[in-house]
Amino acid sequence: MAEIDAQPFAFGFKLDTLALVVIDMQRDFAEPGGFGASLGNDVSRVTAIVPTVKKLIEGFRDAGLPVIHTMECHRADLSDLPPAKRNRGNPSIRIGDVGPMGRVLIVGEPGTAILDELTPLPGEIVIEKPGKGAFYATSFGDDLRRLGAQQLVFAGVTTEVCVQTTMREANDRGYECLLAEDATESYFPEFKAAALAMIRAQGAIVGWTATTDQVLQGIA
Ligand code: TIU
């Protein structure tokens, strides 16, 4: 068993059962004019972690380990978008409306795309998910089983919404989960801090946290 120096204690893993899951690093959450901004958020916090997420992704690629990307998005006909989700949050532009980067969070639209710097490589799994969690209504669980993954490292946005939801779903399914502290971000620093604390509380009740450098040292 290899180890990553982590909180609340060392994270044990095997190199052939470890995968990286990068959650929703999409233009709609990171750029002005997107969904995140339409909710009234300062998206520069998200933009700031892009180099760190890139470093983490490249470390996994260099080690020959799987990298899985997720995207929060919906079908053009909105058939997978419950009205309760569409109307939530009172955004200036709702999901499915036409915004400065095309229809907000709709498959194939410019704003829905993963940021250029973090574009998935051919062959990397990309999960298009209608929910906040990556397991709901997707092939994510089957993909992880096919890969033989047992331990998951998480990065992406936002810490307390799609990242934490997916980590909790994964934890309940028996995966050991570690969140890269500096490769995840929230629009609210206090929410990020609370999410990290909740995840690793009570002896890693949902999972572990570590810095990107600690993760990369562990897999080197
Ligand atoms: N990806 C993700 O977290 N979706 C959100 O809507 N997050 C917010 O924090 N709004």
Image (spheres, rainbow, N blue to C red):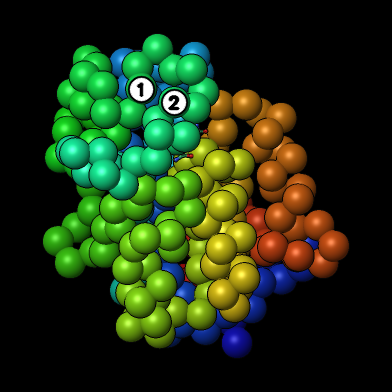
Q: Which residue is mark 1?
A: 94
What is the count of numbered marks?
2
Q: Give, as a three-letter code, the residue at label 1.
A: Arg
> Above or below — where is 124 with respect to 16?
above
Where residue 87 is drawn, which disc sits there? 2
Residue visible at 61% across and 41% down in the picture: 160
Quadrant of residue 203 in the image?
Answer: bottom right
Image position of 179 (left or right of 116): right
For residue 77, above or below residue 1? above
Residue 75 visible, this angle: yes
* Callout 1: SS: loop
- What residue do we see at 76% from left, 50% from top? 198
- Say few, some or many: other residues with alpha carbon within 10 Å of mark 2 (under 14 / 14 to 19 / 20 or more): few
Horizontal and vertical percent for residue 34? 33, 22
Residue 13 lies left or right of residue 190; in this view the side is left
The quarter of the displayed image where residue 217 is located: bottom right
Looking at marks 1 and 2 on the same chain, the residue that comes earlier in the sequence is marked by 2
Considering the image in quadrants, where does the N terminus appear? bottom right
Q: Position of residue 30 (x, y in %)?
A: 38, 28
Q: Does label 1 point to a residue whose CB lies under 8 Å from ligand 1?
A: no
